[in-house]
Amino acid sequence: MGNTANLDQVLEALDATNGLEELQAISEALRDALDIRHIVYHWVDSAGDQYGCGTYPDTWVQRYVEQNYHRIDPVILGCFQRFHPVDWKRMDWSGKAAKMMLADALEHGVGNQGYSIPIRGPNGQFALFTANHNCRDDEWAAFTEAYGRDLLLIAHYFNRKALDFETDRKPEQARALSPREVDAMTLLAMGYNRAQVAHSLSISEHTLRVYIESARFKLGALNTTHAIATAMSRGLIVV
């Protein structure tokens, strides 16, 4: 599983997308680059409306919606209470309904392993970005260890693009930056380069990119320079 040489190309293609239909092609390209069974982006809002794209079979997507599985799905319920990526095996599948849903999923071509990343945007928006495969536990652990950071970055890129294109879900007002986003933007405003910022915050450059992209989206900025200027003008960072 995995092919790092193609991931940068997927990110470039993702950044260049111009519509929701192109996100489907990106999810397929990412699945192929990682050599796994499925990549899925799944949105569920407070009213129960859903949006998604990915490589699950159409028969499973239809089945999932018809059965209202999002109301009992341990991954949805568990990730809604978390901020960090979650391995499916750590979710509570002990209930009868959850066991039946899992068996149904496996019959419809969903793999036995999953890694889901909760994503929260402005005004409490919530989505999941999931990598799915069929393999042994040790193989999956090695995969998530090797590609967890890449998936985190791509998940946030994916969510930002989906929100850009889905006008009904665009936030009216941006949420305040998180403390880590403030730290990152402040250091960038002071003239630090990305490597220096990552070192100062004791994080990887992959993680730093996630903070920057998240801040940029919240501020409605076209690029990092625009984000810094906007944050300073609003008094969110002080240099």
Image: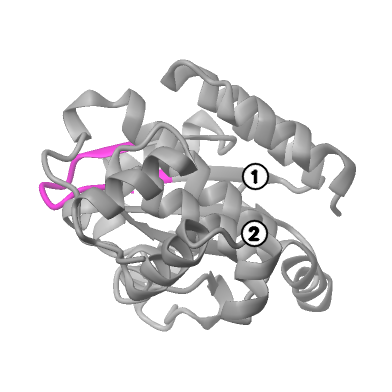
Quadrant of res 177: bottom left
- State whether residue 71 is above or below residue 171: below
Residue type at numbered disc 1: His
Residue visible at 61% across and 44% down? 39
Q: Nearer the viewer, residue 67 or 32?
A: 32
Q: Is residue 84 visible?
A: yes
Q: Label 2: how many residues lie within 10 Å, few (<14), some (14-19) or many (20+)? A: some
Q: Position of residue 128 (x, y in %)?
A: 42, 54
Amino acid on which disc 2 is placed = Arg
Q: Is residue 203 left or right of residue 47?
A: right
In terms of sequence position, does the residue under pointer 2 or pointer 1 come before the other?
1
Image-based side of 238 in relation to 31, left or right: left
Q: Residue at x 53, y 57 (%)?
A: 210
Q: Position of residue 174 (x, y in %)?
A: 19, 48
- Look at the image and give the residue range highlighted in magenta: 42-51
- Residue at 11% x, 38% y is 172
- Quadrant (top left, top right, bottom left, bottom right) of the N terminus: bottom right
Left or right position of 216 against 203: left
The percent position of residue 202, horizontal first and vertical second, equals 63, 82
Q: Which residue is mark 1?
A: 38
User: In this figure, which residue is indicated by the disc labeled 2?
Assistant: 194
Under circle 2, the secondary element is helix
Report the front residue among 127 and 171. Answer: 171
